[in-house]
Image: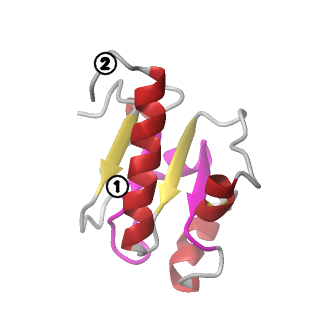
Amino acid sequence: CVRGADVIVTVTFSSEPIVEAEWLKTGAHINAVGGLRGRYEADVDVYKRATIVVESLEHKEEDMKGLYAMGVEPLCELGELIKGTRKMPDNKEFSVFHSLGMGLEDIATAELIYNQYMKRNEKQLL
């Protein structure tokens, strides 16, 4: 169950969404790592209500077509957030790191999110 979770990580081969927007609390973050080409682990409402970050805006154009078909466009590349050249906006309910297949960045992202969480919630372990 993901209700009330701060961070959700999906790593599946699901051809159907397994996370619904109505289950998520405002401010939730999803690391969407799995899914099949053209299929997404979160429903369309999650993507429409989220700030979306990807590894590369040019990487795997085939995978990006599905996002554009939903009527959403990624904010920026993960590297821009890490370098501090881009900031997350406050006008979206959720954030999604939509992984397009670069495993090292998935691990770096998980560590970054974990460290930020622990700074804010020192006494509460995940």
Determine the image quadrant of residue 21. Answer: top left
Q: CA distance from mark 2 to mark 1?
A: 30 Å
User: Which residue carries the number 2 mark?
Assistant: 124
Q: Mark 2 or mark 1: name the one nearer the start of the chain.
A: 1
Q: Is residue 25 visible?
A: yes
Say the numbered circle drawn on residue 17: 1
First to last magenta residue range:
29-56
Marks 2 and 1 in Cβ contact (< 8 Å): no
Residue 88 x/y as whole percent:
68, 43
52 over 126 or under it: above or below: below
**Residue drawn at x 61%, y 55% as measured from the top left:** 82
Q: Residue furthest top?
A: 123
Quadrant of the rendering where the N terminus is positioned: top left
Determine the image quadrant of residue 20. Answer: top left
Front position in the image: 105 or 99: 105
**Residue drawn at x 34%, y 55% as measured from the top left:** 17
Callout 2: few (<14), some (14-19), or many (20+) C-alpha neighbours within 10 Å? few
Q: Is residue 17 left or right of residue 67?
A: left
Amino acid at dot 1: Pro
72 over 21 or under it: above or below: below
Residue 44 located within the stretch drawn in magenta: yes
Q: Is residue 110 left or right of residue 16?
A: right
Residue 90 x/y as whole percent:
71, 33
**Residue drawn at x 39%, y 70% as measured from the top left:** 104
Quadrant of the rendering where the C terminus is positioned: top left
Residue 70 x/y as whole percent:
59, 62
Q: Is residue 33 left or right of residue 97?
A: left
Determine the image quadrant of residue 39. Answer: bottom left
SS category of the residue bearing label 2: loop
Amino acid at dot 2: Gln
Front position in the image: 23 or 99: 99
How many discs appear?
2
